[in-house]
Amino acid sequence: MQKRTSDDLSRATGQSNMEQPVLQMEVVGVRVEMPTNQPIVLLKEAHGDRFLPIWIGMTEATAIALAQADEPPPRPLTHDLFRDVLSALGVGLRAVNIVALRDGIFFADLVFSNGVEVSARPSDSIALALRTGARIFASEEVVQEAGVIIPDDQEDEVEKFREFLDTISPEDFGQAG
């Protein structure tokens, strides 16, 4: 575990030790990439057009989706426990910073209200941010390297298809043969 403390003003604003510009991001949602069935969390620039897809595990995808849907699980998940422990200790999660992309692996820092930073996986960081209301940032360098622009017409078509999928069930396709 990597821990750092600092009274640096940039950390007090939740911008971590990133020296390059940072961009505020919003969580669009969790999707499954076909044909690999690999889940991704899709972030979008809060004030821009680029999307940042991050491949994640199924457990983290479920944790993120539940937090977005505001559906509490029957028993607390690890991220819920972490949120509750932070609250009991009187420490808040100020920000999540996605700081690097090396060899196809994203790296993030959790920035706490007491000035401590802890290195973490972006998937866990995002799941925790959604539970605590912390802001999510990504370095400009990461977004330049891995970000994509989805044209509006494609975005509309994808959304229409998602809406269609939400209205059907496997029974709608009947039996083959």
Image (spheres, grey):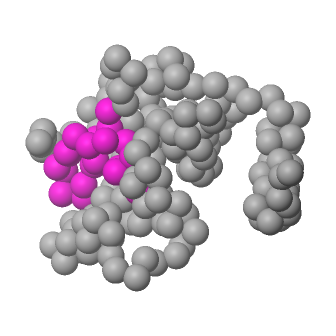
Foreground residue among 176 and 35: 176
Does residue 92 appear left or right of residue 158 in this picture? Answer: left
Give the quadrant of residue 113.
bottom left
Q: Position of residue 24 (x, y in %)?
A: 52, 41
Farthest residue in the front direction? 177
Q: Position of residue 61 (x, y in %)?
A: 47, 52
Does residue 71 appear left or right of residue 131 in this picture? Answer: right
The residue depicted at 39 percent of the width and 66 percent of the height is 132
Give the quadrant of residue 86.
bottom left
The residue depicted at 32 percent of the width and 33 percent of the height is 107
Q: Which residues are magenta?
A: 107-127
**Quadrant of the frame with the N terminus:** top left
Is residue 56 part of the magenta span, yes or no?
A: no
The residue depicted at 83 percent of the width and 33 percent of the height is 154
Q: Is residue 135 above or below residue 9?
A: below
Q: Can residue 7 be seen in the rendering of this structure? A: no
